[in-house]
Amino acid sequence: MTSHAHHQLDQLRLEWRSLQRSRASREAAALLIDEHVELAAWPISDLGDVVDLLEPGGPLSQLERSRLAALLLESCPRDPLIQRALLQTLLPGIVGVARRLGWGRRSGEDPAVFLADLVTTAFEVIDEWGGQQRPYAAPDLLNAVRCRMRRRLASEAMGSVTPLERPDGSVVELPAEPDDDPLESIKARLESVAHEVDPVGAAALYGREVLGLSYRELAEMTGVSPRQLASKGREVARRILW
């Protein structure tokens, strides 16, 4: 990550710091609780509290954090600050996606510009999916961002290829990159057994195989040790892949 990319992340964090305890944030949190009364049992007075609860070191379990992220996505249309709160929780994952895609360097793109594009794409997906009910909201969003950027990079790479000509002067049409992503089958299989497998193991498998995060990175995001994540992820993999 370049110093410019670090600066962008710092700016986003500073922006959130100025918003998280504001009156608008308190009002958005009240809307959130009004729509999902189960949240009244948690210590939430503003959206800053919501984002803090989603931190791996917070008091919630992995399953509870997944549920809270899903409720944020479902309530996004109610208030734009809820969208911003969800984006804030996704920033570590967005950095992981950037790393998975090589920071765009293979396409000659500046890492800072690439990160800005990822953040913009993440916000666009949040806006498009707002109101939907998705049990795996956070990883689903990150996977959508990864797929969109991967396709964009592939499209740009195809566009940079010099056209091949036949002897008669006609251009050889290169096949378009398929939209199907083999990793999507893992996502689909996880969704089919969502209520039958350990949620920590499912998150470990999803993060490792679909998002390309290391167990150390996943440990920082979930609060579960890398060894436990690896073990639980293997158990789920045996269930759905082997």
Image: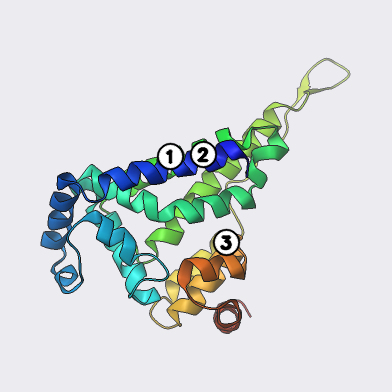
Front-most of residues 190 and 110:
110
Q: Which tag, 1 or 3, sits closer to the chain's start?
A: 1
Q: Quadrant of residue 163?
A: top right
Residue for point 85% across, 16% down: 168
- Disc 1 residue type (three-letter): Gln
The residue labelled by disc 2 is 7
Q: Which residue is mark 3?
A: 210
Crowding around mark 1 (Cα neighbors within 10 Å: few <14, some 14 to 19, many 20+) is few
User: Quadrant of the image for the C terminus?
Assistant: bottom right
In the displayed orientation, state which residue is furthest to the right. 167
Q: Which mark is residue 11?
A: 1
Spatial CA distance of label 1 from label 3 is 28 Å
Q: Residues within 10 Å of mark 3 (few under 14, many from 20)?
A: many
Kindly report which numbered mark, 3 or 2, lies closer to the viewer in this rendering.
2
- Identify the image quadrant of the N terminus: top right
Mark 2 to mark 1 CA distance (whole Å): 6 Å
Spatial distance from mark 3 to mark 2, Cα to Cα? 27 Å
- Residue depicted at x 33% and y 62%: 52
Q: Residue 152 — which label?
A: none
Callout 3 touching callout 2 (CB < 8 Å): no
The residue lying at 37 percent from left, 49 percent from top is 87
Instruction: Tell me if mark 2 has few (under 14), some (14-19) or many (20+) residues whose alpha carbon lies within 10 angstroms of its own.
Output: few
134 versus 194 height, above or below: above
